[in-house]
Image (cartoon, rainbow, N blue to C red):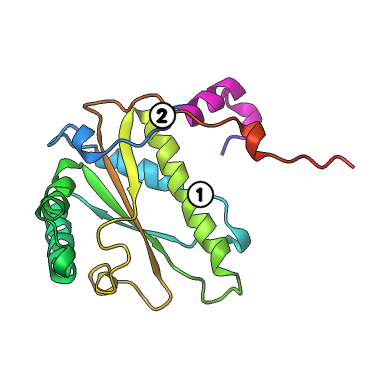
Amino acid sequence: MSTINEIMITPDQIDQLIRLRRSTFPDQFEKGRQIEEVTIWRLLENANWAPNHKRTEPWRFTVFTGEGLKRFAAFQARRYKETAGEKFRQDKYDKLLENPERASHIIAIILRRSTTVDIPEMEEIAAVACAVENIWLSITAYGLGGYWSTGGPTFDPAAREFFGLDDGDRLMGFFYLGHIRVPSVAGSRRPIQEKTTWVKE
C-alpha cells in the first residue's frame, strides 16, 4: 500500500472534501437509479480502515438493496404501527414504508462488541462512528448522496432478531445511499474559536 507521502492529496483537497460533506435525504435521491455494487464494496472497504483501539474492528454492516429494501420497509412500518399506540401518524407510517425504496442501498450499522479484548464500549462506539464517517467522506468524493439515520427500528427490541444481532451487539442506525437528484444546500458552522480552549502553560 502507498504511504501518505507517495499519494498526491493536498491539505486543501482534504479540507474541501470534509467541508463539502452533506446529508442527502431519500426525497433528494434519484429513485430507481442504482449504485454499482463494486462502489458499495469500495465504501465498505474505506469504512473498514477506520481507527479502532486494540484493533477490535467492531463494525458490522448489513446491506439492503432490491427486494431487500421492500423487506426492510415492511418491517419498520409494521413495527411502528404495532408500537405507536395513540401516537400513530399515518404520514410517518407512509414515510417509513416509502423512503427505503427511494434509496439505492441502505446499510444497517452494527456494533459488535469484542469478546476477547477488555475495552470500554464507548471506544467501540467511537470506532463504528469513525467507520461511518469514512463512508460519508467517500460518497462525497464519489458524488453520491447519503445520510445516517437513527430512526425507524434502531432502538426497537424486535430489531435484534430481524437484523441477526448477537448478545452484546448494538444497532447504531442506518445509512441511506442514492444518486443525488436535488443537492443539499450549503452548510454552515459556528466559529471553531467558540468551541476551543487552549492550554499553553
Residue at image coords 29%, 25%: 183
Q: Would you say residue 10 sits in the magenta stretch? A: yes
The quarter of the picture where the C terminus appears is top right
Q: Which residues are magenta?
A: 3-19
Q: Position of residue 180 (x, y in %)?
A: 25, 29
Kindly identify the residue that appears in the image at 61 percent across and 60 percent down.
53
What x and y, as percent, mark residue 150?
34, 55
Q: Is residue 79 visible?
A: no
Q: Amino acid at mark 2?
A: Ala
Q: Is residue 183 visible in this depiction of the protein?
A: yes
Per the image, label 1 sits on a secondary structure element best described as: helix
Q: Which residue is mark 1?
A: 130
Measured as percent of width and height from the top left, residue 93 is found at: 13, 56
Give yes or no for contact between labels 2 and 1 (Cβ–Cβ under 8 Å): no
Q: Position of residue 10 (x, y in %)?
A: 59, 22
Residue density around tag 1, few if under 14, some if 14–19, many if 20 or more, within 10 Å: some
Q: Amino acid at mark 1?
A: Cys
Residue under the image location 54 percent in, 68 percent down: 121
Report the residue marked by disc 2. 141
Q: Which mark is residue 66?
A: none
Q: With 201 as the anchor, is 115 left or right in this view?
A: left
